[in-house]
Image: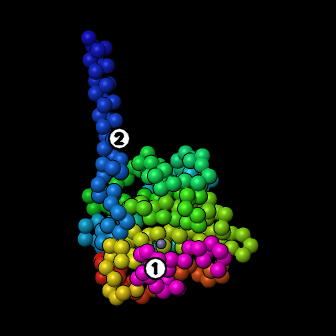
Amino acid sequence: MKLLLFALGLILLLNQCSKKDVKSTVAANAANNKSVGASAKDILSGQTFTTLQIEIVFMPGYAPDPTALNNLTAFLNMLINKPGGIQITQRVIEASGKTTITLDEIKAIEKANRITFNNGSNISIFILYADATYSTANIVGTAYRNTSLAIFGKTIVNSSGGLNQASRTKFETTVLEHEFGHLMGLVDLGTPMQINHLDAANDKHCNNASCLMYFRTQSNMMSGLLMSSPVPELDANCRNDLRANGGK
Ligand SMILES: [Zn+2]
Ligand SMILES: [Zn+2]
């Protein structure tokens, strides 16, 4: 009887655990399962969320470049109001075993691995560093949900650090900052434009060719065009939009 009770208790416990696991998936966390730009104000302003947590998972061989992450943190500190600070965690996950990866596969990896979600005054961002290239050619990173990014580590490694190529740090910084720009609602993607600067022909990008949010920023970096120039910055129009939506 005791054994049976013990067994029952164990089953209940296991049941609770699995329920908890199910609860903390993306689908069950509606606040982290919205479209890109939907949390722009929550990321920018300190009203609802005073701290920002970035959960990075990477596949073997594709750990983030530490300086690129420092650059991203400095970039965010310059733009967003998070008096409690920005915290980054990172850990390795299993390899995808694929050469190219689709958006559905990325979402499945997030579902299986993401452990942090918005909680109290903390807003959580998830970044996957994949060991494959994207199923759409020449894409280095993608913002695919309000708090989710994927970075294609293999594409970054292959397209940087060599002869006639930008440095790994510069390339990766550019990709991270550009994709974060979309999460912050740029351009006209959850953060209203103060004046029209939308590149109408190239979905949700800035019309200024020297702005970080220009549609060709990443491919220019990839083809070595920006090899000797610094990481592109946000232009005045993009900065003004962020300020007007709760940013600094
Ligand atoms: Zn973009
Ligand atoms: Zn711009």
Q: Which residues are magenta?
A: 198-225
How far is disc 1 from disc 2 in space, using C-alphas? 43 Å
Report if residue 102 is visible in the image. Answer: yes
Residue type at numbered disc 2: Asp
Say if the magenta span includes residue 212: yes
Quadrant holding the N terminus:
top left
Name the residue rendered at 53%, 81% in the picture: 232
Q: Which residue is mark 2?
A: 21
Name the residue rendered at 52%, 65% in the picture: 141
Q: Position of residue 105 (x, y in %)?
A: 49, 50
Say if the magenta span includes residue 232: no
Residue type at numbered disc 1: Ala
- Residue positioned most to the right: 163
Chief SS of the magenta region: loop
228 up-or-down from 46: above or below: below
Q: Position of residue 126 (x, y in %)?
A: 42, 58
Q: Is residue 83 left or right of residue 73?
A: left
In this rendering, the count of numbered labels is 2
30 up-or-down from 171: above or below: above
Q: Which residue is mark 1?
A: 201
